[in-house]
Amino acid sequence: MEDTCSDFRIRAYGKADLALLYNPEMCTREALRTLTRWILRNEQLYTELLNLGYRKSCKILTPLEVGVITRHLGEP
């Protein structure tokens, strides 16, 4: 059953912070690798992020980038 009372908000996130929200059971490094892998494997998601100025090496994600990611991957 899906939780309808999510506390997640679209805002700027550190990439590591967002990665840990998606993968709380992983260490930070592995969570980052996993999120990056998900982004790169989803061609439409990656293209949309590139159009917003995203770079794989970025440390901070803008609210627009977070919105695109959650639209494709769902909320963490």
Image (tube, rainbow, N blue to C red):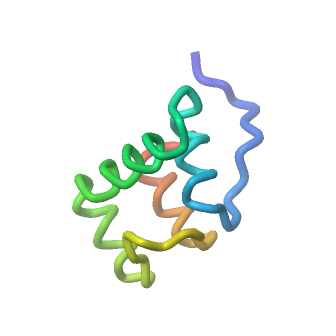
Residue 65 drawn above or below residue 3: below
- Residue at image location 52% in from the left, 69% down from the top: 65
Quadrant in the picture for the C terminus: top right
Up the image or down, 72 lies above or below 65; here it is: above
> Number of callouts in the render?
0
In the picture, the quarter occupied by the N terminus is: top right
Residue 9 place in picture, x, y as percent: 72, 53
- Depth check: give the residue in front, 22 or 10: 22
Q: Position of residue 11 (x, y in %)?
A: 70, 64
Task: Pinpoint residue 45: horizontal percent, then vertical percent.
Answer: 33, 62
Q: Residue at x 57, y 72 (%)?
A: 64
Q: State the residue in front, 16 or 61.
A: 16
State left or right for residue 74 relative to residue 20. left
Q: Quadrant of residue 55?
A: bottom left
Where residue 42 sits in the image (x, y, percent)?
26, 54
Residue at (34, 56) in percent of width and height: 39
- Of residues 49 and 30, the one nearer the viewer is 30
Q: Residue furthest top?
A: 1
Q: Name which residue lies at 39% across and 72% down.
A: 49
